[in-house]
Image (tube, helix red, strand yellow):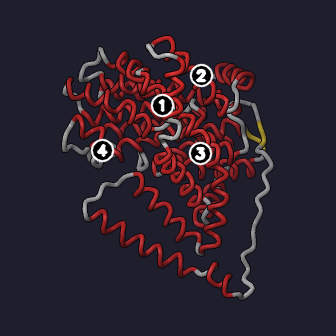
């Protein structure tokens, strides 16, 4: 294992470019594939790309807000105290890797934005305490928990199909798939728990004598002392936060009892107003908001480029070609597994669960309907495929790397190993459960 990890690490350090450069390269690759495998002219392909460049603005805002609200919640005093209690009980690198893996998985299952940011903060705290350890492996372990995000409470696909999803309605009129059949199904819980147990053990197996100290990061503490002015009295009043949290709580309870679906907007709503409450007053909340935008910037700028790739693949028919080729030989039993593989492949070009559902959802749902396969299991196959190759698709690693002050090449060698073993585990469950 040491030799395997060393090989992948050296390979990534030597050849892996920045995540934005990878995004540009993927765009060119898709252009090339479309020219070879579809009948469209270069000018037509450019039109497809340009027309859809801004098509994911609404969804991009939702995803950026997942990250922003997650960061703001992770930076509250309550969460920081929790992290300090965790690090106080860690005395060795082995302990650090086990705790980091378990913590990251659980946090990302709750909310992917919250999980990524709070895992990065915990990695920094562990690094400051232990001083010298393989910090790249520790941060890769923190990122490995992202594998379970799409099976958790902020998973795009299960939340979308829990409501009146347009794609699902075209194939199954009037059908909505409850969370009990997706996130809380016995299969999904079994895969999730197995991944949570496997990932820390893999991290421990990859531990070597290589030691990389945590980067020096100075954290500025801003004073909020009041000078008695009316403006500062309003800015530092706790009552605003409490009143608006109670308004939110009243709305969210009434909406859930009224039968409204628990979707991405509800998740963002909950995390935003928890952050408002726990930050104490408006000015502290705004300070956390300003800091959170730093971690969302790379994510935000890459969304239009991936939207362009998505439009290029969808309008040219390349996405249909890739998906159909993988599922055309499927049976009702193997369709979830083949959907998992196709989801993992397409995720390299469209690293967004919601975006993948737009592109692949109609194909896999029509296939599931014709084969009389379990629609919920097939949908979760796509969700797991999206989450699986996220470990080696750099798009969502950017916020964590920004917190940890590392480059993509510092963690990717370890992420390749996590991807290989988790892919085998998930495939086994999808085929034989």
Residue bearing the label numbered 3: 300
Where 360 sits versus 217, above or below? above
Q: Position of residue 412 (x, y in %)?
A: 64, 30
**Which of pointers 2 and 4 lies earlier in the amino acid sequence?**
2
The answer to whether mark 3 and mark 4 are in CB contact below 8 A is: no
Q: Which mark is residue 310?
A: 1
For residue 93, side relative to residue 105 (left or right): right
SS type, badge 1: helix
Residue bearing the label numbered 4: 165
**Residue nearest the observer in this picture, 12 or 346:** 346
The alpha-carbon separation of the residues under discs 2 and 1 comes to 13 Å
Q: Is residue 304 visible?
A: yes
Mark 1 nearby-residue class (10 Å; few <14, some 14–19, many ≥20): many
The alpha-carbon separation of the residues under discs 3 and 1 comes to 16 Å
**Which of pointers 2 and 1 lies earlier in the amino acid sequence?**
2
The alpha-carbon separation of the residues under discs 3 and 4 comes to 25 Å
Give the quadrant of the C terminus. top left
Q: Is residue 106 visible?
A: no
């Amino acid at each position: 294992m040491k030799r395997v990890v060393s090989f992948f690490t050296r390979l990534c350090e030597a050849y892996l470019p920045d995540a934005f450069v990878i995004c540009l390269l993927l765009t060119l690759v898709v252009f090339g594939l479309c020219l070879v495998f579809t009948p469209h002219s270069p000018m037509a392909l450019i039109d497809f790309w340009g027309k859809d460049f801004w098509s994911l603005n609404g969804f991009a805002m939702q995803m950026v807000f997942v990250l922003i609200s997650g960061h703001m919640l992770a930076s509250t005093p309550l969460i920081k105290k929790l992290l300090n209690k965790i690090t106080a009980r860690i005395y060795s690198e082995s302990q650090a890797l086990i705790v980091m893996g378990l913590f990251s998985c659980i946090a990302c299952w709750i909310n992917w934005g919250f999980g990524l940011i709070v895992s990065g903060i915990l990695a920094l705290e562990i690094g400051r305490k232990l001083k010298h350890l393989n910090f790249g492996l520790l941060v890769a372990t923190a990122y490995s928990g992202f594998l379970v995000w799409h099976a958790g409470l902020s998973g795009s696909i299960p939340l979308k199909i829990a409501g009146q999803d347009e794609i699902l309605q075209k194939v199954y009129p009037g059908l909505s798939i409850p969370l009990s059949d997706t996130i809380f199904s016995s299969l999904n819980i079994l895969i999730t728990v197995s991944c949570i147990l496997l990932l820390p053990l893999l991290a421990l197996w990859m531990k070597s004598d290589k030691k990389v100290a945590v980067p020096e990061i100075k954290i500025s503490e801003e004073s909020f002392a009041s000078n008695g002015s009316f403006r500062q009295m309003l800015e530092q009043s706790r009552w605003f936060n409490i009143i608006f949290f109670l308004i939110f709580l009243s709305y969210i309870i009434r909406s859930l009892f009224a039968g409204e679906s628990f979707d991405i907007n509800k998740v963002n709503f909950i995390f935003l107003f928890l952050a408002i409450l726990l930050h104490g007053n408006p000015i502290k909340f705004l300070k956390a908001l300003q800091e959170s935008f730093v971690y969302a910037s790379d994510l935000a700028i890459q969304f239009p480029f991936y939207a362009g790739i998505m439009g290029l693949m969808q309008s040219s028919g390349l996405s249909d070609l890739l998906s159909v080729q993988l599922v055309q030989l499927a049976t009702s039993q193997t369709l979830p597994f083949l959907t998992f593989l196709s989801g993992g492949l397409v995720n390299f070009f469209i690293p967004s669960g919601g975006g993948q559902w737009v592109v692949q959802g109609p194909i896999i749902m029509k296939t599931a309907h014709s084969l009389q396969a379990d629609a919920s299991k097939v949908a979760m196959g796509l969700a797991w495929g999206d989450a699986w190759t996220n470990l080696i698709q750099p798009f969502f690693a950017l916020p964590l790397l920004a917190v940890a002050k590392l480059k993509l090449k510092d963690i990717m060698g370890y992420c390749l190993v996590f991807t290989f073993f988790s892919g085998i585990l998930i495939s086994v469950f999808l085929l034989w459960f």
